[in-house]
């Protein structure tokens, strides 16, 4: 079992977030070590911490839960210095040093960690990445659950809008549909083509349609569309007050159903 020392700021555990991280790591093959588990009460604190981090028999890897609190913690900085000293030493050149990021932007990283592995706690596979880092193995990332379309919900005037575009395809004519009742109730107000990641204020569309339609399965719907191409840099934006239950999108002759 790889022995991993975890450094953190005590303030970050007010809602037991640190305890949750430890709990998840304890389910792996790692031997997770930290102050409340491995330090002997009544003994000199930094002698024990320094010994734990720098002793190859006590620690195989070091990680810090990096937050605004730990970045400003003198104790965490002290532990980082122990880990870096060991990593840069002749015998410990391959000592793994990594950071678990919690609500931290890359620009906020300490210089010593900007050139080292950082793992975001927002990633679903962060536990797997920690195990890989401690074991000095690549995490073997395998993408999954992705579609050939990109969807982004934005805040808009009087509600929201859903941006829809293909990742790499070029589709024309393009259309977006909702249930007829969504349009008639005033919940869904409009749909416009526009540049990717830029909510349009209006639109200039070729052969624009904005009308009632009946889908091939008999569903009464409202459709917007045009010959404006949807592609990796051009999207369609559906505006609504409350997220509709169903949205159809794609080529006008081959619509797909998006269930929200």
Image: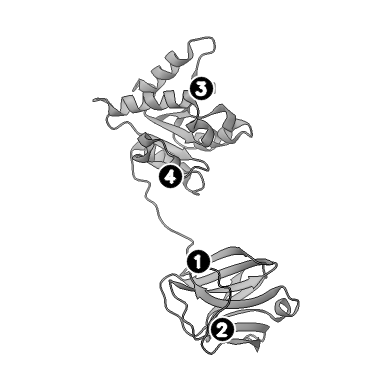
Instruction: List the residue tagged with mark 2.
Output: 225
Local secondary structure at mark 4:
helix
**Camera-nearest residue between 18 and 72:** 72
Count residues near mark 3 (Cα–Cα under 10 Å), then give few for <14, some for 14-19, many for 20+.
Answer: some
**Camera-nearest residue between 182 and 194:** 194
Expressed as whole percent of the image width and height from the top left, the position of residue 27 reads 51, 37
Expressed as whole percent of the image width and height from the top left, the position of residue 181 reads 73, 79
Instruction: List the residue tagged with mark 1.
Output: 197
Q: Give the CA separation, mark 4 to mark 2.
A: 40 Å
Q: Give the CA separation, mark 2 to mark 3.
A: 60 Å
Instruction: List the residue tagged with mark 4.
Output: 106
Expressed as whole percent of the image width and height from the top left, the position of residue 9 reads 53, 29
Which badge, 1 or 4, is on the more N-terminal residue?
A: 4
Which badge, 1 or 2, is on the more N-terminal residue?
A: 1
Residue 260 visible in the picture: no
- The vertical placement of 2 against 190, above or below, is above
Local secondary structure at mark 1:
loop
Which badge, 1 or 3, is on the more N-terminal residue?
A: 3
Instruction: List the residue tagged with mark 3.
Output: 35
Residue that lies at the very extreme toward the bottom in this rendered image? 207
Which badge, 3 or 4, is on the more N-terminal residue?
A: 3
Which badge, 2 or 3, is on the more N-terminal residue?
A: 3
**Camera-nearest residue between 210 and 139:** 210
Residue depicted at 57% across the width and 32% down the height? 12
Q: Give the CA separation, mark 3 to mark 4.
A: 27 Å
Residue 5's quadrant in the figure? top left
Residue depicted at 39% across the width and 23% down the height? 53
Quadrant where the C terminus sits is bottom right
Count residues near mark 2 (Cα–Cα under 10 Å), then give few for <14, some for 14-19, many for 20+.
Answer: many
Which tag is nearer the camera, tag 1 or tag 2? 1
Which tag is nearer the camera, tag 1 or tag 3? 1
Residue that lies at the very extreme toward the front in this rendered image? 201
């Amino acid at each position: 079992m790889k022995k991993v020392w975890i450094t953190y700021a005590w303030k970050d555990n007010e809602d037991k977030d640190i305890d949750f991280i430890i709990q998840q790591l304890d389910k792996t093959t790692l031997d997770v070590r930290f102050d409340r588990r491995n330090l002997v009460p009544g003994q000199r604190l930094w002698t024990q911490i320094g010994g734990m981090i720098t002793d190859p028999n006590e620690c195989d890897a070091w990680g810090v839960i990096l937050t605004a609190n730990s970045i400003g913690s003198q104790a965490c900085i002290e532990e980082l210095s122990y880990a870096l000293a060991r990593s840069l030493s002749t015998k410990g050149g391959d000592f793994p040093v990594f950071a678990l990021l919690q609500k931290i932007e890359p620009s906020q990283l300490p210089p010593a960690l900007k050139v080292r592995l950082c793992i975001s706690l927002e990633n679903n596979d962060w536990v797997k990445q920690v195990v890989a880092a401690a074991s000095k193995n690549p995490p073997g990332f395998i993408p999954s659950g992705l579609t050939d379309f990109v969807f982004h919900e934005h805040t808009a005037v009087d509600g929201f809008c859903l941006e829809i575009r293909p990742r790499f395809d070029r589709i024309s004519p393009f259309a977006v549909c909702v249930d007829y009742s969504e349009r008639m109730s005033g919940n869904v107000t409009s749909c416009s083509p526009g540049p990717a990641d830029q909510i349009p204020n209006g639109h200039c569309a070729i052969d624009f349609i904005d009308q009632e339609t009946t889908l091939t399965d008999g569903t009464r719907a409202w459709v917007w569309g045009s010959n404006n191409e949807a592609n990796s840099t051009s999207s369609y934006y559906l505006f609504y007050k409350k997220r509709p239950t169903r949205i159809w999108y794609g080529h006008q002759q081959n619509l797909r159903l998006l269930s929200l």
